[in-house]
Amino acid sequence: MASIRRVKGENLYIRYLILSCWGLFCLMPVLWFLSIGFRPRTEIITAQPIYFPTLSLDAWHMIWSDWPMAKYLRNSVAAIFGSVMIDLVLAIPAAYSLSRYEYRGREDIGFYILSTRMMAPAIVAIPIFFLFRNLGLLDTIWALMLVYAAINLSIVTWIIRSYMTDIPRELEDAARTDGAGDLRILWEIIIPAILPGIITAAVIAMIFVINEFLFTLLIASTPDAYTMSVALANFTGGSDGVIYNAIALVAFLAFVPVFLVVIAIQKHLSRGLTMGAVKG
Amino acid sequence: MHDSSLSDTRSAPATTAVTKTRFRRRSKWLRAWFPYLLVAPAVIYLLGITLYPGIYAIVQSFYAVKFGPWNPVGFNNYVKLWGDYQFWGALWNTLLMGTISLTLQCVLALTLAFHAYRDPWVRGWRIIFLVPMLFMPSAVAFIYKLMFLDARVFSDILIRFGLVDGNLAIQSSIWGSRALLILTDVWQWTPFLFIIFVAALQGQDEEIEEAARLDGATWAKIFWNISLPLMRPVIAVALVIRGIDITTMFANVFIVTKGGPAFGTETISYFIYRTGFKFFNFGYASAASVIMLVLTIIVAQVVVKRAFKSARG
Protein backbone atom coordinates (compact mmCIF):
# COMPACT_ATOMS: atom_id res chain seq x y z
CA MET A 1 0.00 0.00 0.00
CA ALA A 2 2.76 2.38 -0.87
CA SER A 3 0.97 4.60 -3.30
CA ILE A 4 -2.57 5.88 -3.21
CA ARG A 5 -4.54 3.31 -5.17
CA ARG A 6 -7.69 4.27 -6.89
CA VAL A 7 -10.16 2.97 -9.37
CA LYS A 8 -10.82 4.53 -12.70
CA GLY A 9 -13.14 7.46 -12.37
CA GLU A 10 -12.69 7.93 -8.64
CA ASN A 11 -11.86 11.45 -7.72
CA LEU A 12 -9.29 11.68 -4.94
CA TYR A 13 -10.40 15.18 -3.98
CA ILE A 14 -13.88 13.87 -3.31
CA ARG A 15 -12.46 10.96 -1.32
CA TYR A 16 -10.50 13.21 0.98
CA LEU A 17 -13.24 15.80 1.16
CA ILE A 18 -15.72 13.20 2.39
CA LEU A 19 -13.35 11.59 4.83
CA SER A 20 -12.11 14.83 6.36
CA CYS A 21 -15.62 16.23 6.65
CA TRP A 22 -16.68 13.21 8.65
CA GLY A 23 -13.47 13.40 10.68
CA LEU A 24 -14.26 16.98 11.61
CA PHE A 25 -17.85 16.07 12.37
CA CYS A 26 -16.54 13.39 14.75
CA LEU A 27 -13.94 15.50 16.48
CA MET A 28 -15.46 18.98 16.77
CA PRO A 29 -18.07 18.10 19.43
CA VAL A 30 -15.40 16.17 21.33
CA LEU A 31 -12.94 19.06 21.35
CA TRP A 32 -15.66 21.47 22.30
CA PHE A 33 -16.75 19.19 25.15
CA LEU A 34 -13.14 19.00 26.31
CA SER A 35 -13.10 22.78 26.51
CA ILE A 36 -16.24 22.57 28.66
CA GLY A 37 -14.32 20.48 31.16
CA PHE A 38 -11.73 23.20 31.66
CA ARG A 39 -13.90 26.26 31.98
CA PRO A 40 -15.67 27.76 34.99
CA ARG A 41 -19.36 27.01 35.39
CA THR A 42 -20.32 30.58 34.64
CA GLU A 43 -19.10 30.25 31.07
CA ILE A 44 -21.02 27.12 30.11
CA ILE A 45 -24.62 28.19 29.70
CA THR A 46 -24.66 31.77 28.59
CA ALA A 47 -26.79 33.96 26.36
CA GLN A 48 -24.20 33.53 23.63
CA PRO A 49 -21.98 30.44 23.57
CA ILE A 50 -18.38 31.18 24.52
CA TYR A 51 -15.93 29.46 22.22
CA PHE A 52 -12.70 30.64 23.84
CA PRO A 53 -13.22 30.37 27.59
CA THR A 54 -10.88 31.16 30.45
CA LEU A 55 -9.00 28.14 31.68
CA SER A 56 -10.21 26.80 35.01
CA LEU A 57 -9.63 23.64 36.98
CA ASP A 58 -12.77 24.05 39.09
CA ALA A 59 -14.37 20.93 37.72
CA TRP A 60 -11.28 18.86 38.33
CA HIS A 61 -11.25 19.77 42.04
CA MET A 62 -14.98 19.39 42.21
CA ILE A 63 -15.18 15.82 40.98
CA TRP A 64 -12.63 14.63 43.51
CA SER A 65 -13.67 16.64 46.54
CA ASP A 66 -17.44 17.12 46.19
CA TRP A 67 -18.24 13.70 44.83
CA PRO A 68 -16.93 10.26 45.77
CA MET A 69 -15.36 10.00 42.32
CA ALA A 70 -12.72 7.54 43.47
CA LYS A 71 -15.53 5.30 44.71
CA TYR A 72 -17.43 5.47 41.38
CA LEU A 73 -14.20 4.62 39.59
CA ARG A 74 -13.58 1.71 41.94
CA ASN A 75 -17.15 0.47 41.46
CA SER A 76 -16.77 0.63 37.69
CA VAL A 77 -13.47 -1.22 37.72
CA ALA A 78 -14.75 -3.89 40.12
CA ALA A 79 -17.93 -4.42 38.11
CA ILE A 80 -15.98 -4.64 34.85
CA PHE A 81 -13.37 -7.00 36.21
CA GLY A 82 -15.80 -9.25 38.06
CA SER A 83 -18.27 -9.55 35.21
CA VAL A 84 -15.62 -10.24 32.59
CA MET A 85 -14.16 -12.96 34.81
CA ILE A 86 -17.57 -14.61 35.22
CA ASP A 87 -18.05 -14.39 31.46
CA LEU A 88 -14.73 -16.01 30.63
CA VAL A 89 -15.20 -18.85 33.10
CA LEU A 90 -18.62 -19.65 31.64
CA ALA A 91 -17.95 -18.81 28.00
CA ILE A 92 -14.70 -20.65 27.32
CA PRO A 93 -16.05 -24.16 28.05
CA ALA A 94 -19.32 -23.30 26.31
CA ALA A 95 -17.51 -22.03 23.22
CA TYR A 96 -15.31 -25.11 23.21
CA SER A 97 -18.35 -27.34 23.32
CA LEU A 98 -20.08 -25.40 20.53
CA SER A 99 -17.05 -25.34 18.25
CA ARG A 100 -15.57 -28.80 18.75
CA TYR A 101 -18.30 -31.37 19.30
CA GLU A 102 -21.06 -32.64 17.13
CA TYR A 103 -24.22 -33.25 19.08
CA ARG A 104 -27.93 -32.88 18.90
CA GLY A 105 -29.25 -29.42 19.63
CA ARG A 106 -25.87 -27.75 19.24
CA GLU A 107 -27.05 -25.11 16.79
CA ASP A 108 -30.14 -24.41 18.87
CA ILE A 109 -28.12 -23.97 22.04
CA GLY A 110 -25.72 -21.66 20.20
CA PHE A 111 -28.59 -19.64 18.87
CA TYR A 112 -30.27 -19.48 22.25
CA ILE A 113 -27.10 -18.01 23.70
CA LEU A 114 -26.93 -15.49 20.87
CA SER A 115 -30.59 -14.56 21.22
CA THR A 116 -30.17 -13.42 24.81
CA ARG A 117 -28.28 -10.50 23.29
CA MET A 118 -31.52 -9.44 21.57
CA MET A 119 -33.34 -8.99 24.85
CA ALA A 120 -33.99 -5.32 25.57
CA PRO A 121 -32.81 -4.44 29.07
CA ALA A 122 -36.18 -2.80 29.70
CA ILE A 123 -37.98 -6.13 29.24
CA VAL A 124 -36.17 -7.87 32.07
CA ALA A 125 -35.54 -4.78 34.15
CA ILE A 126 -38.57 -5.09 36.42
CA PRO A 127 -38.21 -8.80 37.28
CA ILE A 128 -34.46 -8.39 37.79
CA PHE A 129 -35.14 -5.46 40.07
CA PHE A 130 -37.48 -7.56 42.21
CA LEU A 131 -35.14 -10.54 42.10
CA PHE A 132 -32.25 -8.55 43.48
CA ARG A 133 -34.48 -6.83 46.01
CA ASN A 134 -35.58 -10.20 47.34
CA LEU A 135 -32.00 -11.40 47.46
CA GLY A 136 -31.00 -8.24 49.30
CA LEU A 137 -28.51 -7.43 46.57
CA LEU A 138 -29.99 -4.13 45.45
CA ASP A 139 -27.52 -1.31 45.53
CA THR A 140 -24.43 -3.53 45.58
CA ILE A 141 -21.76 -4.02 42.97
CA TRP A 142 -22.35 -7.79 43.23
CA ALA A 143 -25.72 -7.33 41.58
CA LEU A 144 -24.14 -5.19 38.88
CA MET A 145 -21.48 -7.83 38.25
CA LEU A 146 -24.07 -10.58 37.82
CA VAL A 147 -26.21 -8.51 35.46
CA TYR A 148 -23.27 -7.27 33.40
CA ALA A 149 -21.98 -10.81 33.08
CA ALA A 150 -25.35 -11.92 31.76
CA ILE A 151 -25.52 -9.06 29.25
CA ASN A 152 -22.16 -9.93 27.75
CA LEU A 153 -22.12 -13.70 28.03
CA SER A 154 -23.62 -14.18 24.57
CA ILE A 155 -21.12 -11.87 22.91
CA VAL A 156 -18.13 -13.35 24.70
CA THR A 157 -19.21 -16.91 23.91
CA TRP A 158 -19.76 -16.19 20.22
CA ILE A 159 -16.50 -14.31 19.76
CA ILE A 160 -14.46 -17.04 21.44
CA ARG A 161 -16.34 -19.71 19.54
CA SER A 162 -15.49 -18.04 16.25
CA TYR A 163 -11.78 -18.01 17.09
CA MET A 164 -11.88 -21.63 18.25
CA THR A 165 -13.50 -22.78 15.02
CA ASP A 166 -10.52 -21.35 13.14
CA ILE A 167 -7.98 -23.52 14.90
CA PRO A 168 -6.99 -26.50 12.77
CA ARG A 169 -8.08 -29.80 14.24
CA GLU A 170 -4.67 -31.37 13.59
CA LEU A 171 -3.32 -29.27 16.40
CA GLU A 172 -5.48 -31.17 18.86
CA ASP A 173 -5.31 -34.51 17.16
CA ALA A 174 -1.58 -34.76 17.83
CA ALA A 175 -2.13 -34.22 21.53
CA ARG A 176 -5.14 -36.53 21.56
CA THR A 177 -3.19 -39.45 20.19
CA ASP A 178 -0.72 -38.80 22.96
CA GLY A 179 -3.54 -39.38 25.40
CA ALA A 180 -4.34 -35.87 26.56
CA GLY A 181 -7.89 -35.44 27.78
CA ASP A 182 -10.33 -32.93 26.34
CA LEU A 183 -10.04 -30.49 29.21
CA ARG A 184 -6.26 -30.57 29.07
CA ILE A 185 -6.34 -29.91 25.35
CA LEU A 186 -8.60 -26.96 26.00
CA TRP A 187 -6.35 -25.56 28.69
CA GLU A 188 -2.95 -26.23 27.16
CA ILE A 189 -3.54 -25.90 23.44
CA ILE A 190 -6.75 -24.10 22.60
CA ILE A 191 -6.68 -21.29 25.14
CA PRO A 192 -3.11 -20.18 24.39
CA ALA A 193 -3.81 -20.38 20.67
CA ILE A 194 -6.86 -18.11 20.80
CA LEU A 195 -5.56 -15.66 23.37
CA PRO A 196 -6.06 -12.70 20.99
CA GLY A 197 -9.69 -13.78 20.61
CA ILE A 198 -10.18 -14.01 24.36
CA ILE A 199 -8.66 -10.57 24.84
CA THR A 200 -10.88 -9.16 22.09
CA ALA A 201 -13.95 -10.64 23.74
CA ALA A 202 -12.93 -9.21 27.11
CA VAL A 203 -12.39 -5.74 25.64
CA ILE A 204 -15.73 -5.70 23.83
CA ALA A 205 -17.44 -6.88 27.01
CA MET A 206 -15.65 -4.13 28.92
CA ILE A 207 -16.92 -1.44 26.54
CA PHE A 208 -20.51 -2.63 26.93
CA VAL A 209 -20.18 -2.74 30.71
CA ILE A 210 -18.87 0.81 30.89
CA ASN A 211 -21.73 1.95 28.68
CA GLU A 212 -24.52 0.08 30.47
CA PHE A 213 -27.06 2.50 31.77
CA LEU A 214 -30.57 1.23 32.47
CA PHE A 215 -29.76 -1.66 34.81
CA THR A 216 -27.24 0.39 36.71
CA LEU A 217 -29.79 3.14 37.11
CA LEU A 218 -32.31 0.71 38.60
CA ILE A 219 -30.02 -1.46 40.68
CA ALA A 220 -27.84 1.28 42.08
CA SER A 221 -30.03 3.68 43.97
CA THR A 222 -27.37 5.29 46.14
CA PRO A 223 -23.77 6.28 45.37
CA ASP A 224 -22.65 3.02 47.01
CA ALA A 225 -23.01 1.18 43.75
CA TYR A 226 -22.93 3.99 41.18
CA THR A 227 -20.67 3.41 38.25
CA MET A 228 -19.25 6.21 36.13
CA SER A 229 -22.00 5.91 33.54
CA VAL A 230 -24.84 6.49 35.98
CA ALA A 231 -22.87 8.83 38.23
CA LEU A 232 -22.76 11.13 35.20
CA ALA A 233 -26.53 11.31 34.98
CA ASN A 234 -26.65 12.35 38.62
CA PHE A 235 -24.21 15.23 38.36
CA THR A 236 -26.96 17.70 38.70
CA GLY A 237 -26.67 20.52 41.15
CA GLY A 238 -30.36 20.65 41.96
CA SER A 239 -31.55 24.15 41.26
CA ASP A 240 -28.30 25.02 39.50
CA GLY A 241 -29.00 22.57 36.70
CA VAL A 242 -26.62 20.06 35.21
CA ILE A 243 -22.95 20.42 36.14
CA TYR A 244 -21.55 20.08 32.66
CA ASN A 245 -17.88 20.75 33.29
CA ALA A 246 -17.68 17.91 35.80
CA ILE A 247 -19.54 15.62 33.42
CA ALA A 248 -17.12 16.46 30.62
CA LEU A 249 -14.08 15.64 32.72
CA VAL A 250 -15.51 12.34 33.92
CA ALA A 251 -16.45 11.44 30.36
CA PHE A 252 -12.86 11.96 29.27
CA LEU A 253 -11.49 10.10 32.28
CA ALA A 254 -13.50 7.07 31.19
CA PHE A 255 -12.72 7.61 27.52
CA VAL A 256 -8.91 7.57 27.64
CA PRO A 257 -8.34 4.02 28.92
CA VAL A 258 -11.02 2.60 26.62
CA PHE A 259 -9.49 4.40 23.64
CA LEU A 260 -6.01 3.06 24.37
CA VAL A 261 -7.21 -0.52 24.83
CA VAL A 262 -9.29 -0.41 21.66
CA ILE A 263 -6.36 0.90 19.60
CA ALA A 264 -4.33 -2.01 20.91
CA ILE A 265 -6.85 -4.55 19.59
CA GLN A 266 -7.75 -2.57 16.45
CA LYS A 267 -7.10 -5.50 14.12
CA HIS A 268 -9.65 -7.68 15.89
CA LEU A 269 -12.29 -5.03 16.41
CA SER A 270 -14.56 -5.76 13.46
CA ARG A 271 -14.62 -9.43 14.32
CA GLY A 272 -15.40 -8.71 17.93
CA LEU A 273 -18.16 -6.24 17.17
CA THR A 274 -19.99 -8.71 14.94
CA MET A 275 -19.60 -11.51 17.49
CA GLY A 276 -17.26 -13.34 15.16
CA ALA A 277 -19.49 -13.22 12.11
CA VAL A 278 -17.10 -11.02 10.13
CA LYS A 279 -13.51 -12.10 9.99
CA GLY A 280 -11.58 -8.91 9.52
CA MET B 1 -4.05 -12.78 11.27
CA HIS B 2 -3.37 -15.22 14.09
CA ASP B 3 -0.20 -16.65 12.64
CA SER B 4 1.99 -15.46 15.45
CA SER B 5 -0.18 -16.86 18.19
CA LEU B 6 -0.52 -20.20 16.46
CA SER B 7 3.16 -20.76 15.92
CA ASP B 8 3.89 -20.02 19.57
CA THR B 9 1.74 -22.81 20.83
CA ARG B 10 2.36 -25.38 18.18
CA SER B 11 5.53 -26.68 19.81
CA ALA B 12 4.92 -26.39 23.54
CA PRO B 13 1.90 -28.60 24.33
CA ALA B 14 2.98 -31.48 22.09
CA THR B 15 6.02 -32.17 24.25
CA THR B 16 4.16 -32.08 27.53
CA ALA B 17 1.58 -34.45 26.18
CA VAL B 18 4.21 -36.97 25.19
CA THR B 19 5.82 -37.13 28.61
CA LYS B 20 2.56 -37.76 30.41
CA THR B 21 0.86 -40.40 28.40
CA ARG B 22 -2.34 -41.19 30.10
CA PHE B 23 -5.16 -43.27 28.83
CA ARG B 24 -8.40 -42.07 30.09
CA ARG B 25 -11.24 -44.52 29.97
CA ARG B 26 -14.30 -42.49 30.13
CA SER B 27 -17.59 -44.19 30.40
CA LYS B 28 -19.87 -44.01 27.45
CA TRP B 29 -22.31 -41.92 29.40
CA LEU B 30 -19.76 -39.24 30.16
CA ARG B 31 -18.54 -39.17 26.59
CA ALA B 32 -22.03 -38.54 25.29
CA TRP B 33 -22.86 -35.87 27.84
CA PHE B 34 -19.51 -34.12 28.05
CA PRO B 35 -20.28 -31.40 25.46
CA TYR B 36 -23.56 -30.67 27.22
CA LEU B 37 -21.77 -30.42 30.55
CA LEU B 38 -19.37 -27.88 29.08
CA VAL B 39 -22.10 -25.65 27.73
CA ALA B 40 -24.50 -26.14 30.65
CA PRO B 41 -23.17 -23.54 33.10
CA ALA B 42 -23.46 -20.75 30.54
CA VAL B 43 -26.94 -21.85 29.47
CA ILE B 44 -28.17 -22.18 33.06
CA TYR B 45 -26.83 -18.74 33.88
CA LEU B 46 -28.56 -17.22 30.86
CA LEU B 47 -31.80 -19.07 31.57
CA GLY B 48 -31.68 -17.65 35.08
CA ILE B 49 -31.37 -14.16 33.74
CA THR B 50 -33.83 -14.49 30.83
CA LEU B 51 -36.30 -17.29 31.51
CA TYR B 52 -36.89 -16.40 35.13
CA PRO B 53 -37.58 -12.73 34.37
CA GLY B 54 -39.69 -13.74 31.38
CA ILE B 55 -41.95 -15.95 33.47
CA TYR B 56 -41.99 -13.40 36.28
CA ALA B 57 -43.07 -10.68 33.86
CA ILE B 58 -45.81 -12.87 32.38
CA VAL B 59 -47.20 -13.70 35.81
CA GLN B 60 -46.95 -10.12 37.02
CA SER B 61 -48.70 -8.84 33.91
CA PHE B 62 -51.93 -10.44 35.14
CA TYR B 63 -51.87 -8.50 38.38
CA ALA B 64 -52.23 -4.93 39.45
CA VAL B 65 -49.01 -4.38 41.34
CA LYS B 66 -48.34 -1.17 43.14
CA PHE B 67 -46.42 -1.42 46.38
CA GLY B 68 -48.67 -3.62 48.41
CA PRO B 69 -50.22 -6.98 47.57
CA TRP B 70 -50.70 -8.24 44.04
CA ASN B 71 -54.32 -8.04 42.93
CA PRO B 72 -55.27 -10.37 40.10
CA VAL B 73 -56.87 -8.48 37.23
CA GLY B 74 -56.91 -11.07 34.47
CA PHE B 75 -56.27 -9.64 31.05
CA ASN B 76 -57.06 -6.10 32.16
CA ASN B 77 -53.51 -4.84 31.74
CA TYR B 78 -53.44 -6.07 28.17
CA VAL B 79 -56.83 -4.65 27.37
CA LYS B 80 -55.75 -1.31 28.78
CA LEU B 81 -52.52 -1.49 26.82
CA TRP B 82 -54.44 -2.11 23.61
CA GLY B 83 -56.24 1.20 24.05
CA ASP B 84 -53.26 3.13 25.41
CA TYR B 85 -52.19 5.65 22.79
CA GLN B 86 -48.98 6.32 24.72
CA PHE B 87 -47.95 2.69 24.35
CA TRP B 88 -48.66 2.66 20.61
CA GLY B 89 -46.95 6.01 20.33
CA ALA B 90 -43.85 4.64 22.03
CA LEU B 91 -43.84 1.65 19.70
CA TRP B 92 -44.23 3.93 16.70
CA ASN B 93 -41.50 6.31 17.88
CA THR B 94 -39.10 3.43 18.43
CA LEU B 95 -39.72 2.09 14.94
CA LEU B 96 -39.68 5.51 13.30
CA MET B 97 -36.51 6.84 14.90
CA GLY B 98 -34.85 3.44 14.64
CA THR B 99 -35.52 3.08 10.93
CA ILE B 100 -34.41 6.60 10.03
CA SER B 101 -31.32 6.37 12.20
CA LEU B 102 -30.33 2.93 10.93
CA THR B 103 -30.79 3.91 7.29
CA LEU B 104 -28.70 7.04 7.72
CA GLN B 105 -25.97 5.15 9.53
CA CYS B 106 -25.86 2.42 6.92
CA VAL B 107 -25.62 4.81 3.97
CA LEU B 108 -23.03 7.00 5.69
CA ALA B 109 -20.92 4.07 6.84
CA LEU B 110 -20.97 2.48 3.38
CA THR B 111 -19.96 5.75 1.73
CA LEU B 112 -17.17 6.32 4.21
CA ALA B 113 -15.97 2.73 4.12
CA PHE B 114 -15.88 2.69 0.35
CA HIS B 115 -13.75 5.81 0.26
CA ALA B 116 -11.48 4.75 3.10
CA TYR B 117 -10.70 1.08 2.66
CA ARG B 118 -8.09 1.50 -0.07
CA ASP B 119 -6.63 4.61 1.42
CA PRO B 120 -3.04 4.35 2.68
CA TRP B 121 -4.13 6.11 5.88
CA VAL B 122 -7.08 3.83 6.56
CA ARG B 123 -5.85 3.03 10.07
CA GLY B 124 -5.67 6.72 10.89
CA TRP B 125 -9.18 7.35 9.59
CA ARG B 126 -10.43 4.41 11.60
CA ILE B 127 -8.97 5.75 14.83
CA ILE B 128 -10.45 9.21 14.25
CA PHE B 129 -13.87 7.86 13.34
CA LEU B 130 -13.84 5.54 16.36
CA VAL B 131 -13.65 8.37 18.87
CA PRO B 132 -17.41 9.06 19.27
CA MET B 133 -18.17 5.37 19.74
CA LEU B 134 -15.84 5.09 22.72
CA PHE B 135 -17.56 7.70 24.84
CA MET B 136 -20.14 6.49 27.28
CA PRO B 137 -23.61 6.90 25.75
CA SER B 138 -24.66 8.95 28.75
CA ALA B 139 -21.74 11.32 28.10
CA VAL B 140 -22.66 11.60 24.43
CA ALA B 141 -26.23 12.38 25.40
CA PHE B 142 -24.96 15.23 27.57
CA ILE B 143 -22.72 16.55 24.77
CA TYR B 144 -25.73 16.85 22.49
CA LYS B 145 -28.07 18.13 25.17
CA LEU B 146 -25.61 20.90 25.92
CA MET B 147 -24.75 21.66 22.30
CA PHE B 148 -28.30 21.82 21.01
CA LEU B 149 -30.52 22.62 23.96
CA ASP B 150 -28.75 24.19 26.92
CA ALA B 151 -25.87 26.17 25.40
CA ARG B 152 -27.52 26.50 21.97
CA VAL B 153 -24.24 26.26 20.06
CA PHE B 154 -26.03 24.92 17.00
CA SER B 155 -28.46 27.82 16.90
CA ASP B 156 -25.60 30.25 17.43
CA ILE B 157 -23.65 28.88 14.47
CA LEU B 158 -26.72 29.07 12.23
CA ILE B 159 -27.33 32.66 13.34
CA ARG B 160 -23.72 33.61 12.63
CA PHE B 161 -24.06 32.27 9.12
CA GLY B 162 -27.27 34.19 8.76
CA LEU B 163 -29.37 31.10 8.20
CA VAL B 164 -31.88 31.77 10.96
CA ASP B 165 -32.94 34.85 12.86
CA GLY B 166 -33.25 33.63 16.41
CA ASN B 167 -32.62 30.60 18.59
CA LEU B 168 -34.24 27.42 17.39
CA ALA B 169 -36.90 25.96 19.63
CA ILE B 170 -35.70 22.38 19.28
CA GLN B 171 -37.01 21.33 22.66
CA SER B 172 -40.60 22.20 21.95
CA SER B 173 -40.73 20.67 18.49
CA ILE B 174 -41.44 16.96 18.19
CA TRP B 175 -39.50 16.56 14.97
CA GLY B 176 -36.70 18.76 16.29
CA SER B 177 -36.33 16.49 19.31
CA ARG B 178 -36.54 13.37 17.21
CA ALA B 179 -33.91 14.72 14.84
CA LEU B 180 -31.68 15.49 17.80
CA LEU B 181 -31.93 11.93 19.13
CA ILE B 182 -31.30 10.54 15.66
CA LEU B 183 -28.29 12.80 15.16
CA THR B 184 -26.87 11.72 18.52
CA ASP B 185 -27.20 8.08 17.56
CA VAL B 186 -25.78 8.61 14.07
CA TRP B 187 -22.80 10.51 15.45
CA GLN B 188 -21.95 7.88 18.01
CA TRP B 189 -22.69 4.66 16.15
CA THR B 190 -21.93 5.17 12.46
CA PRO B 191 -18.32 4.18 13.29
CA PHE B 192 -19.59 0.78 14.42
CA LEU B 193 -20.87 0.01 10.93
CA PHE B 194 -17.90 1.77 9.31
CA ILE B 195 -15.37 -0.49 11.02
CA ILE B 196 -17.24 -3.63 10.06
CA PHE B 197 -17.75 -2.51 6.45
CA VAL B 198 -14.09 -1.53 6.02
CA ALA B 199 -13.01 -4.93 7.29
CA ALA B 200 -15.43 -6.64 4.92
CA LEU B 201 -14.27 -4.59 1.92
CA GLN B 202 -10.62 -5.22 2.74
CA GLY B 203 -11.33 -8.92 2.95
CA GLN B 204 -12.80 -9.06 -0.55
CA ASP B 205 -10.93 -10.70 -3.35
CA GLU B 206 -9.20 -7.95 -5.29
CA GLU B 207 -8.92 -10.00 -8.44
CA ILE B 208 -12.62 -9.88 -9.16
CA GLU B 209 -12.49 -6.11 -8.91
CA GLU B 210 -9.37 -6.03 -11.05
CA ALA B 211 -11.04 -8.12 -13.74
CA ALA B 212 -14.05 -5.82 -13.77
CA ARG B 213 -11.77 -2.82 -14.00
CA LEU B 214 -9.96 -4.30 -16.99
CA ASP B 215 -13.33 -4.75 -18.62
CA GLY B 216 -13.74 -1.02 -18.28
CA ALA B 217 -16.21 -0.86 -15.40
CA THR B 218 -16.32 2.42 -13.51
CA TRP B 219 -15.90 2.49 -9.77
CA ALA B 220 -19.57 3.16 -9.23
CA LYS B 221 -20.44 0.09 -11.26
CA ILE B 222 -17.90 -2.03 -9.43
CA PHE B 223 -19.33 -0.90 -6.14
CA TRP B 224 -22.96 -1.56 -7.03
CA ASN B 225 -22.51 -4.76 -8.98
CA ILE B 226 -19.61 -6.45 -7.23
CA SER B 227 -18.62 -5.10 -3.82
CA LEU B 228 -22.09 -4.48 -2.47
CA PRO B 229 -23.62 -7.87 -3.33
CA LEU B 230 -20.56 -9.60 -1.84
CA MET B 231 -21.03 -7.62 1.34
CA ARG B 232 -24.68 -8.46 1.80
CA PRO B 233 -24.29 -11.05 4.58
CA VAL B 234 -21.97 -8.74 6.50
CA ILE B 235 -24.32 -5.80 6.11
CA ALA B 236 -27.17 -7.97 7.34
CA VAL B 237 -25.37 -9.00 10.52
CA ALA B 238 -24.14 -5.50 11.24
CA LEU B 239 -27.58 -3.98 10.75
CA VAL B 240 -29.21 -6.62 12.92
CA ILE B 241 -26.84 -5.94 15.80
CA ARG B 242 -27.17 -2.18 15.41
CA GLY B 243 -30.93 -2.44 14.94
CA ILE B 244 -31.31 -4.23 18.26
CA ASP B 245 -29.33 -1.57 20.06
CA ILE B 246 -31.30 1.22 18.46
CA THR B 247 -34.66 -0.23 19.42
CA THR B 248 -33.54 -0.50 23.01
CA MET B 249 -32.40 3.14 23.07
CA PHE B 250 -32.76 4.46 26.57
CA ALA B 251 -29.91 6.61 27.89
CA ASN B 252 -30.33 9.27 25.20
CA VAL B 253 -34.05 9.59 25.79
CA PHE B 254 -33.58 9.60 29.55
CA ILE B 255 -31.01 12.38 29.44
CA VAL B 256 -31.83 14.52 26.41
CA THR B 257 -35.60 14.63 26.00
CA LYS B 258 -37.24 12.61 28.81
CA GLY B 259 -39.58 11.37 26.11
CA GLY B 260 -40.95 14.82 25.36
CA PRO B 261 -42.34 16.96 23.95
CA ALA B 262 -45.83 15.47 24.14
CA PHE B 263 -44.36 11.93 24.33
CA GLY B 264 -43.05 12.49 20.81
CA THR B 265 -39.68 10.89 21.51
CA GLU B 266 -40.71 8.28 24.05
CA THR B 267 -39.28 4.90 23.10
CA ILE B 268 -40.69 1.60 24.27
CA SER B 269 -37.84 1.17 26.77
CA TYR B 270 -38.59 4.56 28.23
CA PHE B 271 -42.30 3.78 28.35
CA ILE B 272 -41.64 0.64 30.41
CA TYR B 273 -39.24 2.52 32.68
CA ARG B 274 -41.68 5.38 33.21
CA THR B 275 -44.69 3.13 33.87
CA GLY B 276 -42.76 0.87 36.22
CA PHE B 277 -40.32 3.03 38.05
CA LYS B 278 -41.88 6.48 37.87
CA PHE B 279 -45.53 5.58 38.38
CA PHE B 280 -44.80 2.26 40.13
CA ASN B 281 -47.37 0.55 37.97
CA PHE B 282 -45.38 -2.68 37.79
CA GLY B 283 -48.11 -4.99 36.54
CA TYR B 284 -48.92 -2.70 33.65
CA ALA B 285 -45.25 -2.22 32.79
CA SER B 286 -44.79 -5.98 32.84
CA ALA B 287 -47.59 -6.40 30.33
CA ALA B 288 -45.76 -4.01 28.02
CA SER B 289 -42.55 -5.99 28.64
CA VAL B 290 -44.28 -9.22 27.67
CA ILE B 291 -45.45 -7.74 24.37
CA MET B 292 -41.91 -6.50 23.71
CA LEU B 293 -40.61 -9.96 24.58
CA VAL B 294 -42.93 -11.63 22.08
CA LEU B 295 -41.90 -9.16 19.37
CA THR B 296 -38.23 -9.76 20.22
CA ILE B 297 -38.59 -13.52 19.95
CA ILE B 298 -40.31 -13.24 16.59
CA VAL B 299 -37.62 -10.93 15.24
CA ALA B 300 -34.85 -13.10 16.69
CA GLN B 301 -36.25 -16.26 15.11
CA VAL B 302 -36.95 -14.77 11.71
CA VAL B 303 -34.34 -12.10 11.09
CA VAL B 304 -31.41 -12.69 13.39
CA LYS B 305 -31.11 -16.41 12.83
CA ARG B 306 -31.06 -15.95 9.08
CA ALA B 307 -28.55 -13.10 9.18
CA PHE B 308 -26.06 -14.97 11.31
CA LYS B 309 -26.43 -18.20 9.36
CA SER B 310 -25.70 -16.54 6.04
CA ALA B 311 -22.72 -14.64 7.43
CA ARG B 312 -21.12 -17.77 8.79
CA GLY B 313 -21.70 -19.55 5.52
Image: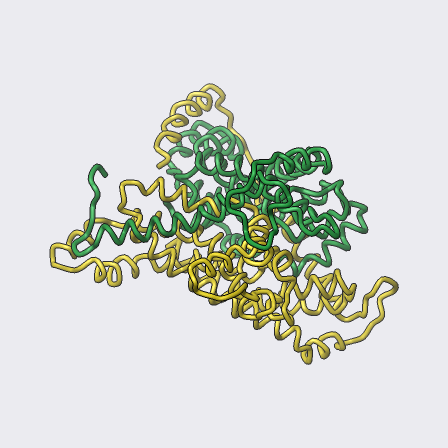
- Residue at x 41% of width, y 27% of height: B9
- Residue at x 75% of width, y 62% of height: B278
Percent across and percent down for residue B146 are: 58, 53
Taking B20 as reference, is A96 above or below it? below
The quadrant in which the C terminus of chain A is found is: top left
The quadrant in which the N terminus of chain A is found is: top left
Taking A116 as reference, is A33 above or below it? above
Chain with green colouring? A
Percent across and percent down for residue A234 are: 70, 48
Instruction: Give B212 or B95, whichever is nearer the viewer.
Output: B95
In this rendering, position of residue B89 left or right of residue B2: right
In this rendering, position of residue A278 left or right of residue A70: left
Percent across and percent down for residue B192 are: 44, 51
The answer to whether residue A237 is seen in the rendering is: yes
Instruction: Give B191 or A141, whichever is nearer the viewer.
Output: B191
Percent across and percent down for residue A187 are: 52, 31
The answer to whether residue B28 is seen in the rendering is: no
**Colour used to depict chain B in the structure image:** yellow
